[in-house]
Amino acid sequence: MRGPVAPRDPEKKRQFYFLMKDKNVFAFPTPDGKGITPIYLDGGRLIEASKFVGNLSDENLIDMLKTAQGFKKLVHSIGVIVDGCDKDTECKFVFQFYGKNDLLGGGTLLEMPVACNGAEHLLDLSAIDLTDEDKEVGQCRFEYGANDFTANVTVKLYLNDGFDAPVQEEDTPVDLESAEFAAHVRDSVLQVGNSYRFNKVVEKARRGEDTTIAFIGGSITQGAGAVPINTECYAYKTYEAFKKLTGMDENIHYVKAGVGGTPSELGMLRYDRDVRRDGEAEPDVVIVEFAVNDEGDETKGVCFESLVRKIWNGKSQPAVIILFSVFANDYNLEDRLSPVGKAYDLPMVSLKACVTDQFYKTKDTGRLITKAQYFYDVFHPTNTGHSVMAMCLEQVMKDMLDNKSEADTDFDKVVSPIGTDFETVVLFDKKDKPVEALIDEGDFDSTDTELQAVEMNMDIKGTKQFPNNWRFDAKKHGSFSKPFTMEVEAKRLVIINKDSGSPLEGVADVYVDGEYVRSINPLDNGWVHCNPLIILNDTECKKRRVEVKMAKGSEEKSFTILGFGIVR
């Protein structure tokens, strides 16, 4: 099972009402050995379900449901959740409009694969054009790869801007304070590890000295899914829990440095800038969360271990906690990354161990939290999900207080489980030049201001990432002619480019010492975010010449170099 290389930040949820809510359905057998659950919505049944299940009473909205075009004007997208059956079951959601002249064959037919794991899937109607033949909503159905079984289905109708949905009945609230849930929180602690540093930090805080707890990771650490993002995210809630554990307040400081869609390959480059603030802030505790983002790490764990060592060996000798978050499809990279925690005897927390077994239970078998309650979308937690994450981190901190280690781990004696090639990497950009280099900007002489922006620390407003960049702006130059060049001593090099969804962005070719290394297409991921890519991984430190030029066919398009990572 794989996760996306760069999951997008979540879109703001629209107002909705339930068309079906936790509806128990049966898969009727079909001649081909599969199963089908038809749910008829024609003849006023759509309106009755909207009234009865969704609490819809606005007559103007009800009138819109009578026609296909009215439904399309009202409904932006359809949310579908299937659970209560084998999570590996194949399922397809079909939504059918009936035709005016050909009832079953003349209307628009929409299809969407749906995983039977309790995650919500969205069928976007905004890009669908209906025809004059479409009469009304006819039916929806669930088509399965097997038959003779039951499932639970939920269907939500998300409304277009300008329409207000009625208040919906909520699921049974999650009792996060129950003894049963506390047991699952305890299960999240994969390893307490060596607690020596953490206990030293707590002693420091209790003496009234300035103490900083920091978080670095992807969009979940950024706070995606939390509303509001600054106070409902797991990082802030963990900070509050840490203050409670120490019994202190004003001397406890908070750093949140999550950037959506980015792996530890970028995290190791951002650490000094975003967490240490180039030496202005030295953290005492650092939580590292890249378990669902590191599919994009080209080194398959070397960058993660390098980041952990970079943090551990920092000036302030911080305590390090490894956090394994999870996606709605149960995916994370715990198996790949946990050997780092085991080798260095670090505390590790797994949300997968805490909640995923709950998602496949029913009310009758003791389910404490649903997947819809935990996840905002298929990637990011809800406010409740963020609370659960903070509870798990609080649990491991309590365990460390109860299990005091007498001495620190000697990292120098640890046999590296994956690799530490990038432990000493430094970030190099137009403003910060920690090593000597000779730069010729060439046609990359502009600065890009349309950048990925993320909410850092307590901010609601986004901070633009890598503003000190080099950009080839085709609007300025017309056509590309002169490459960007850099001469620097290095044995390993990472280039950071800006991804984009704009067709005005083009492909750039990268050369090192005159040899072609790779082409970079900023449209591969399709959204504005920061993308680190290795362009040199050698064992010898010597003078290198890096050249970036627009590729053939992209001479009249633009490209942005956000910065470089340099290992000497």
Image: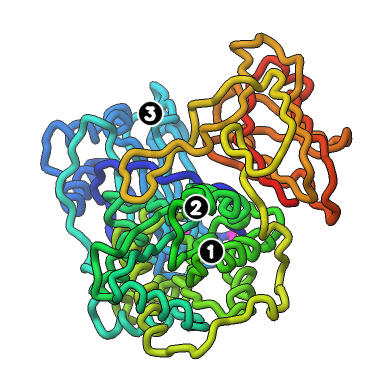
Residue at the image position 40 percent from the left and 25 percent from the top: 133
Residue 134 numbered mark, or none: 3
Residue 101 numbered mark, or none: none
Residue that numbered label 2 is attached to: 279
Q: Residues within 10 Å of mark 1 (few under 14, many from 20)?
A: few
Residue at the image position 44 percent from the left and 33 percent from the top: 108
Residue 566 position (above or below residue 508) = below
Q: Of the residues tagged 3 and 1, which is closer to the observer?
A: 1
Overall secondary structure of the magenta section:
loop
Which amino acid type is marked by label 2? Gly
Q: CA distance from mark 3 to mark 2?
A: 64 Å
Q: Check whether the beta carbons of the residues at disc 2 and disc 1 lie within 8 A of each other.
A: yes
Disc 1 secondary structure class: loop
- On the image, the x and y values in percent for residue 49 come to 22, 50
- On the image, the x and y values in percent for residue 161 come to 26, 31
Residue that numbered label 1 is attached to: 315
Whether 92 is among the magenta residues is: no
Q: Which residues are magenta?
A: 32-36
Residue reaching furthest to the top: 478
* Quadrant of the frame with the N terminus: bottom right
Q: CA distance from mark 2 to mark 1?
A: 9 Å
Q: Closer to the N terminus: mark 3 or mark 1?
A: 3
Q: Residues within 10 Å of mark 3 (few under 14, many from 20)?
A: many
Whether 34 is among the magenta residues is: yes
Residue at the image position 55 percent from the left and 49 percent from the top: 270
Query: In this rendering, does residue 318 appear at all?
Result: yes
Which amino acid type is marked by label 1? Lys
The image quadrant of residue 412 is bottom right
Q: Check whether the beta carbons of the residues at disc 3 and disc 1 lie within 8 A of each other.
A: no
Residue 20 position (above or below residue 431) = below
Specify whether 379 is left or right of 172: right
Near-viewer residue (179 or 556) = 556
